[in-house]
Amino acid sequence: MTVSFVSVVAIFLLPQLTLIYSDCEHNIRNINAEKGNYTYCVYHSIEEVLNVLVPALKQQPPLPEVMQVYHKDPMVMKAVMPIYNRKPFIVIEGVQGTKKTLLAKRLAQEINGTYIRNPPFVMEKLYHYLDDHCSQVSSAFMAFGNYIVAEQAKKLLPTHPVVLDKYWHGVTAFNLAKAAQDLGIEIPQPSSLVYYWPEDLLMPDLAFYIMVSDEVLKFRFHKTFKKVYPKDFRNNIHKALMRMTSPKMWRINGNLKRIDVESQISMRVYKMFSRMLFPEINPKRLTA
């Protein structure tokens, strides 16, 4: 089952915000300036996202509809779900050409779960407006998608496993790589706070990173006549993902045959979540 839209009680957030915006400058004042977020277009709270997004897009007709999908209710907005009486929340990351979307859909089918894509379908209505805005607004738009899919996941997890195709890890790594490319700077060092998980965003139980060699990527893109990202860009995405430790990224060898890649993922999932996926089965039987 694919989730394209989840209706949530609407709370329009504009009156609650202190709007901070300055014509696409990369060094915009930040409520969490010590993280250096806006230099790299990385966001660690919904307030940071909306402080950029709302002023830029508030005149666009679809924005109120998109805002209604997000619900900032203290009882709903929990970054950590209870361990019991729910199903696992799994994320799959990887650059274009790693087949992460196909792998995410296949995993969702295998564990009888729900596949969710990011950005969500409901946000497609705003895509063409982004052409008139700077990369900072575009990155805030993508970051907003993280919070929408998190709310979708929270509604499903009590009864269904959720497999999410791209989340905060991938969005953040892409933004860091793009800032490095556009500004001619290095991505932050491993100790930087920029890699810390947002406190108000639902954290996945497990995150996979599909790794594919340059040779395999070029071969796949050559077959589809698509343009591959520059090597330096891909390397910066890789370095950023490897520097994220909370939650840890589980590396998967994506150069193998698809059935072998799927097997790597499945083995890790069943090893970690056998009780959550099959609470009615004695765990000893799964290892017999």
Image: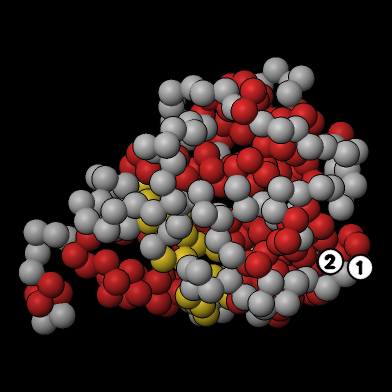
The answer for how far apart the CA atoms under marks 1 and 2 are is 5 Å
Q: Is residue 74 left or right of residue 64?
A: left
Which quadrant, please, contains the C terminus?
A: bottom left
Q: Nearer the viewer, residue 238 or 213?
A: 238
Residue drawn at x 67%, y 64% as measured from the top left = 194
Is residue 122 depicted above or below 82 in this figure?
A: above
Picture residue at 40% right of the left edge, 71% below the top = 265
Q: Residues within 10 Å of mark 1 (few under 14, many from 20)?
A: few
Q: Amino acid at mark 1?
A: Gly
Instruction: Using residue 100 as the reference point, say whether residue 112 is left or right of it.
Output: left
- Marks 2 and 1: in contact by CB < 8 Å? yes
Circle on res. 180: 2
Using the image, tell me which numbered label, if any, was put on residue 105.
none
Residue at 56% over, 35% down: 121
Task: Name the residue rendered at 37%, 37% in the picture.
Answer: 75
Picture coordinates of residue 266 (x, y %)? Answer: 34, 70
Location of residue 107 with respect to 267 vertically, above or below? above
Q: Nearer the viewer, residue 140 or 129?
A: 140
Q: Quadrant of residue 99?
A: bottom right
